[in-house]
Image (cartoon, rainbow, N blue to C red):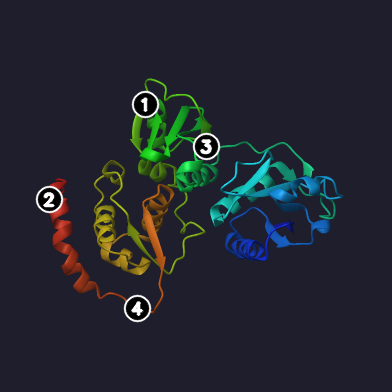
Amino acid sequence: MRTQRLGFVGLGDDTVSACLSMLKIIDGRSSVHWDQSVPGDADVLMVACDQQEQTRQTDLSDKPCIVVYPTTRDRPASTFTLPHPFRVMQLLDVLDEVVRTLATDSNHDRPSAIIQPAKPGSVADFCASLHRVITTKPEQRSELYCSNSEEGQLLVKPASHRFYARPALLHALNAGAVTLSQLAPYTDPVPEGMAARPLFELAWLTGANHSDGLLPWLEPDSQFQLSRWPSAAALNKSRPLLSLCALMTRRALGLAQLQTLSKCDKQTLYHFLNACEVSGLLVSERRTTATQPTPVPVESQRFGGLIRGLRTRLGLS
């Protein structure tokens, strides 16, 4: 794995420290390793928006810049931008965007040269952009976002937790054979013929190939709870998934408890938690004190009646 050097210009110590901590979290998730460097030796600069013009007038002007701007301001006119305060996923997304459009020379001593962008549309890129538009503050996000694919156009409306697609694209999504571009703001009305579907269903279908672990910003030792039930259609009457919903709407539980009580395999558990997070349904909290694992027989009795009732209502028993 090659190394890229990141320099900071005009950012506060707290921001730089937070960014360096996030770089440790995403290390191994990005296609390159990121190290801190002084601006003059850096491959890429992270610049405060009020320092953007000054940077252009110095010997740093030939370096690619990620402009960091307060969320209270409009997005600056720059190729790479990052709102502040930012989260791990937002940082990973913009760094990956830089990697896709810039190539480091073989000796890593000269500024990166522009290359042809990689073809957009990997599932990882789409899921990252979906999470980004869901977590953007309501007053700063667009009403609609658009993604393109060979099977047709897909629209996302974060405010209503819905996505829109034509039948051909919905069929392809269920078959798992769709390559989607990253979401971008969309200003036109929803075209006729597009069906509205729950956003969790989109997160579940597009995240099927990313179930080998939790998303990088989710802490494995956290306790997880649902803010509300996800779409029942996406759950497909799966007993383990219905059990997870019943357990997690009642109270927050750790990974080991969820896997044991729901009798769910680890890959399915990760898939479910990631889909809930991307679609904005997951609430996670770090443990503040050490707790003993919940005894399985007691919890099984507590939730057994609830799960049996749900299965009866859904026609599973």
Residue under the image location 77 percent in, 53 percent down: 43
Q: Is residue 304 left or right of residue 213?
A: left
Residue 112 visible in the displayed image: no
Whether 201 is drawn above or below 109: the answer is: above
- What secondary structure is marked by label 3? loop
Q: Amino acid at mark 1?
A: Pro
Q: Quick one: 218 or 16, which is closer to the camera?
A: 16
Quadrant in which residue 8 is drawn? bottom right
- What secondary structure is marked by label 1? helix
Disc 1/disc 2 C-alpha distance (Å)? 31 Å
Q: Which comes before the other along the chain, label 3 or label 2?
A: 3
Q: Position of residue 284 (x, y in %)?
A: 40, 62
Q: Quick one: 120 or 111, which is closer to the camera?
A: 111
Please identify, in this view, whether the residue under mark 3 or under mark 2 is nearer the observer: 3
**Within-10-Å neighbours for mark 1: few <14, some 14–19, many 20+:** some
Disc 4/disc 1 C-alpha distance (Å)? 48 Å
Give the residue at mark 3. Answer: 183
Q: Amino acid at mark 4?
A: Thr
Give the residue at mark 2. Answer: 312
Q: Which comes before the other along the chain, label 3 or label 1?
A: 1
Q: Position of residue 287 (x, y in %)?
A: 40, 72
- What secondary structure is marked by label 2? helix
Q: Is residue 236 left or right of residue 80?
A: left
Give the quarter of the figure containing the N terminus: bottom right
Give the residue at mark 1. Answer: 167
Give the residue at mark 4. Answer: 291
Disc 3/disc 2 C-alpha distance (Å)? 39 Å
Query: In the current view of this chain or complex, which residue is farthest to the top?
Result: 192
